[in-house]
Image (spheres, grey):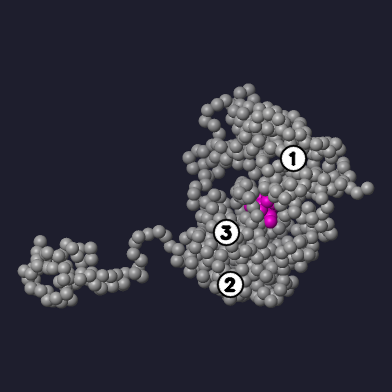
Amino acid sequence: MVKKFYIIASCKEWHRHCFVSLEKDISVDWVWVSSPEELLGALQQEKPRYIFFLHWNWLVPEKIWKSNECVCFHMTDVPYGRGGSPLQNLIVRGHTETTLTALRMVQEMDAGPVYAKRRFSLEGTAHEIYLRAGELSFDLIRWMIKNEPQPEPQKGESVIFKRRTPEQSLLPVFGSVKNLYNHIRMLDAPTYPKAYLEHGEFILEFSGANTCEGELTATVRIRKKIKAGDNMNISIDGVTIGPEHPPYIIAELSANHNGSLDRAFETIKEAKRRGASAIKLQTYTADTMTIDSDRPEFLIKGGPWDGYKLYDLYRWAQTPFEWHKAMFDYAHELGITVFSTPFDESAVDLLEELNAPAYKIASFELTDLPLVEYVAKTGKPMIMSTGMATENEIGEAVTAARNAGCKELVLLHCISSYPAPMEQANVAQLVELGRRFNAVPGLSDHTLGTTASVAAVSLGACLIEKHFILNRNDGGPDSGFSIEPQELERLCTDTRDAWAAVGKPSYNRQEAEQANKIFRRSIYFMRDMKAGEVVEDKDIRRIRPGIGLEPKHFNTLVGKTLKIDVNRGTPTSWELFDE
């Protein structure tokens, strides 16, 4: 008998322990996925009986929910409470318990037919409620696998909840202690914007609330208020990065050493010679990235690494840990800044031993919030790429980093395609990233050539990251989308020229223009004239150079009487005429 195949989809780690228990309890083929890429990989296997979506931050493509039975879980008694922020909206409305609904995914949000409903309590913090809802979701999954029910249409009047904004986390000025308690607890979960108050230049964030005999106690975290522009400069290895400074150019070595330490040294040397601000490594091993598995989801399909197992790709591309000290020492000897992208905590520990001046979080690790927090606790500047990420995911990563101690942050717009199509580069997004998250904006550029990077700098990118190789013909995992030495030199020159060319809005005359002001037009006499003569329009002309009166005074001069004799070619001036 062939085992049935099920997919559990969640981007929240708090569901993991329930999944482990489920695997032990029910002997079927299970796959856990936490990103759209993993979901697509899992669907390369046989067709799943169900796909259970527990907590998912991405829009599920129509082709997936139409061709598979997709089950989502909503924390209200639908059709009441369809929409966003169900937990917070329920508590604000005074509910003390709710219904967890398992429903089939359809085009309209939370509008599908219902498989089952279970009541549960809304007591405790948001995190406690989410854990409770997660456990109940897995109970419903067990029940559905056993009974395979047919979903039934929703009944009743629809009530739509609106997604709450971070600004709504501000504690209310009026109301009861109970209302304050509810407001604090409904936001008390990892990555959520905490309930807060503003006090002058400070933000007071509240968590861990309790009430007793009409009084409320809570943990208060006080931080300085972030104002627009406060985080528009960071410093790496003594170099300031921000709008008022030339763009910071990172040459990404990645796997372009092709397994040779000598080639790595030569690449570092050439990056320095061609003008890069820094050389960046990637710190991982195949075993810290994945496992050696022949399952279909561990096989890459499409793109530059088509046909590779993840484990084999990373084993090919890795920069051995034992090389790092030699590479750091060599970069220091040459006088070029060196740091790295760590892919797990052991990599961070290694880089801390080497006193790395900054850290980069790769796009694929942006949702690994424990890693983000671990890096942030070092107190070093952080650069985070945002390829594939939703606004909510970026917000979660930024919140996690700042809450864990990050004070200097760069967000890089990134298209995670290798190479990225130029028409999809969308470099205008980096402006929004800087504004929305109050961070230094930049670009991790995977397009071919340097055009997108130059355009990005003209829009305000303060940092550019580009994969760098000595010669693309040498091959290697990243060779196809890396730039060569002459291109790196052009990148450094052109981006710095673009930055210098942007300037600031101003109607002031530039210094370089001053000498040419004389070649504007002005009014000159066209014939010899005597004192007492009246000027006619044929007697004067608007010509270059610009020594005489400005052309706008031409009609005013016609009809005026000369006080002194003038010769042909004399520039006009007010002193030559009667009042």
Judging from the image, what secondary structure is the residue with disc 3 in?
loop
On the image, which quarter does residue 254 sit in?
bottom right
Judging from the image, what secondary structure is the residue with disc 2 in?
helix
Instruction: Between residue 317 and residue 322, name the one nearer to us.
Output: 317
Q: Amino acid at mark 1?
A: Arg
On the image, which quarter does residue 423 sit in?
bottom right
Image label count? 3
Q: Which numbered disc covers residue 488?
A: 2
On the image, which quarter does residue 120 sit in?
top right
Mark 2–mark 3 Cα distance, whole angstroms, equals 22 Å
Q: Which numbered disc covers residue 104?
A: 1
Left or right: 50 as drawn, with respect to 461: right
Q: Amino acid at mark 2?
A: Leu
Disc 3 packing (10 Å; few <14; some 14–19; many ≥20) = some
| Rendered position, 149 above or below 339 | above
Q: Secondary structure of the magenta portion, mostly?
A: helix
- Across and down, in percent, residue 233 comes to 51, 57
Q: Which numbered disc covers residue 426?
A: 3
Residue 104 lies within the magenta run: no
Give the residue drawn at x 12%, y 76%: 528
Give the residue drawn at x 79%, y 47%: 7
Judging from the image, what secondary structure is the residue with disc 1 in?
strand
The single residue placed furthest to the left in the displayed view is 532
Give the residue drawn at x 47%, y 60%: 244
**Which span of residues is magenta-colored?**
364-378
